[in-house]
Amino acid sequence: MESLTKNRQPVATLRAMAERAYGAGLVPAGHDWVSELGHGWFNAAYRMRLRDGRQAVLKVAPPPGVEVMTYERDAMATELAALELIREHTGVPVPAVHFADRGRDLCDADWFLMDFVDADNYGMIRDTLAPAEQNGYDEAVGAVNRQLNQIRGRRFGRLDGPGAASWRAFFTQMVEDLLGDGSRRDVDLGFAYADVRAEIAEHAGCLDAVTEPRFVEWDLFPNNVMIRDGRIASVIDHERAFYGDPLIEAIFIGTGLPAFGDPAAYLRGYGRTELTADEHRRRRLYNVHLGLILVIETAYRGFGSDHADWARARLAEAMTAGAIKG
């Protein structure tokens, strides 16, 4: 997938990175030991085959000269923190980190190496599966999401702090950051920026029901789930994690935005059957937040106009939804 944020590196640099992590003796000669992975919208990623038979994935953060959205800044540090938390506190399968480097002497950005997961990407094959198989995997994703949400934090916000004392404060700041990002690039939301601010402010009181910070993966879409032999082999791409309200997770999007599919199987796996009226109000605010991201990131990633039109339609659905007006 193409994006302006992908920080591709020449083979000589990739070799130097592998040698630093594993030693020169384990890095094969030539060029066919390393190849770019097309999955993902943000970081550049490469698959490496070492002399001892091991395989690894290298992730390289965006270059400093490419402007990213506010919530994406220092995302690689977030991912490393998330991987450590998940491995320490849950049984959710995630790749082990082999080596991380933030020195920026080999390239102009942070990078790290981790396990290569030899499995199918669920998002890429989901439509080829029978409905019963889809439901089974969706339920498994819901169960994994519930495990992740059991991790407790001290404050709301980024995993590495400093955080906010209330969920309302952190969430409304996330929205304000997005609107600032959009304003800097003069992004057409399909709504006046002042109207979006007013909508969030009018209904922000419902956020006060959330009093305990929980680990939120946020980006647990099928494309970030690897499957093998009928089971989830790994969950990948954790750079958007934070401490917040589990209801903001991706598995709940379909309760308000039908374009994201029927959430019933995810909810069964999570242990939920339906949302309360108050939870629907919170979820609709979260769909406004998601819609803002979908629209505004088109300017930062260089996505085409068709994607921008689709994203504005999702934001419009969230902004005009009846539940948020109640």
Image (cartoon, rainbow, N blue to C red):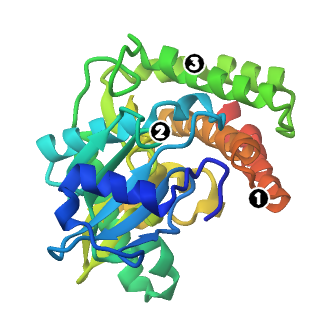
* Residue at image mark 2: 109
Callout 1 crowding tier (Cα within 10 Å): few <14, some 14–19, many ≥20 = few
Q: Quadrant of the N terminus?
A: bottom right
Q: Choose the circle earlier in sequence order: 2 or 1.
A: 2
Q: Are marks 3 and 2 in contact (CB under 8 Å)?
A: no
Figure check: 234 above or below 252? below
Kindly state the secondary structure of the residue where label 1 is placed. Answer: helix
* Residue at image mark 1: 307
Identify residue type, mark 2. Answer: Ala
The one nearer the camera, 319 or 55, is 55
Residue depicted at x 17% and y 77%: 53
Q: Choose the circle earlier in sequence order: 3 or 2.
A: 2
Q: Quadrant of the C terminus?
A: top right
Figure check: 105 above or below 254? above
Q: Which mark is residue 173?
A: 3
Kindly state the secondary structure of the residue where label 2 is placed. Answer: loop
The one nearer the camera, 49 or 293, is 49
In the rendered image, residue 152, in percent from the top left (x then y), is placed at: 23, 29
Residue depicted at x 32% and y 39%: 101
Identify residue type, mark 1. Answer: His
